[in-house]
Amino acid sequence: MGAGDVGLSLAGRLGALGVDVTTLNRSGRSADGARAWRGDLADPATLVDLPMADTVIFTTAPPGRGESDYRLAYVDGPARILAALPSMPDRLVLTSTTGVYGVDDGSWVDETSPTEPSRASAAVVVEGERRLTGQATTTVIVRPAGIYGPGRGSLLERVRAGEEPVSSDGTPRWTNRVHRDDVVGALLVAATHPTPSHVLIAVDDEPAPRDDVIRHLVARLDAPRPSTIDVPSPTGKRCRNAALRALGWEPQYPTYREGYDALLR
């Protein structure tokens, strides 16, 4: 298991269920009850003698924003991990992104929507999905939207500083979010459900116009009144989480209101 913030939280959840968990990252950090393994995806020499695993969960994040950073996290790094294992695991769980859907007109998106990314980085993510699918008996791709939660407060800081504008006439800029803890829950379902779907979108229950989110935060933070920008037509997309919910997943924070209010408390 790749173990950053999301991975370590997931390791703790799995360990609490009695699962034997090994985490792998550069720092050697781990969760209570999990075995720590120090390794660097950029250095194959550190990926030797890895223990056998029935399920491998990739929660790696790119170290930067360049295409090569994304290739390391989503293509080359996972391939190196699988090559270093004693045998192919039964199940792979891949943490992807809703950025693989290139929709930007406010349309609805679900797991059957085509992956036609508009950004080069997202195209690399799709490449990684395709290369890894089929290598194990079961591959589950979890595509979260924008993750927020503890330690992820950049939007709060921009709103507090008055740096987040709203549209001048209310034209929606659709956004999708999911709390960090709910991403962990989604990955837990993907790793343990006996018959998971191949692709799962991890978002909360309410795609929201960005203006609504900003105004909610302005009120909670008593922040400066936001400036305005012209938005000629609806942008973004609206993602559905029905497939994940059908497997028993329920978000602890069903909308941005509950999630951000909990952070601000």
Image: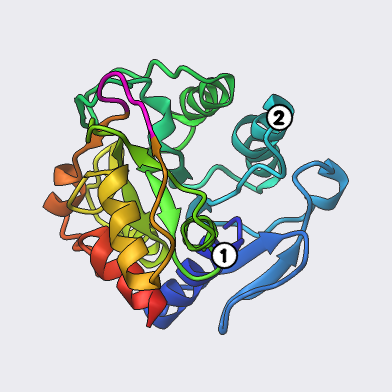
Q: Main secondary structure of the magenta part?
A: loop
Q: Secondary structure at mark 1?
A: helix
Give percent across and percent down for residue 233.
26, 20
Between circles 2 and 1, the one closer to the viewer is 2
User: Residue 240 lies in what quarter of the image?
Assistant: top left
**Would residue 140 be visible to someone looking at this image?**
no
Q: Residue at x 38, y 56 (%)?
A: 225
Q: Which residues are magenta?
A: 229-235
Q: Is residue 198 within the magenta segment?
A: no
Mark 2 or 1 closer to N-term? 1
Q: Residue at x 35, y 53 (%)?
A: 214
Tell me the quarter of the image containing the N terminus: bottom right
Within 10 Å of disc 2 (Cα), the crowding (few <14, some 14-19, many 20+) is few
The amino acid beneath tag 1 is Asp
Give percent across and percent down for residue 243.
17, 43
User: Residue 17 lies in what quarter of the image?
Assistant: bottom left
Give percent across and percent down for residue 152.
53, 62
- Residue position marked by numbered label 1 in the rendering: 5
Q: CA distance from mark 2 to mark 1?
A: 21 Å
Residue 66 got which mark? 2
On the rendered structure, is 22 left or right of 6?
A: right
The amino acid beneath tag 2 is Gly
Residue 17 got which mark? none
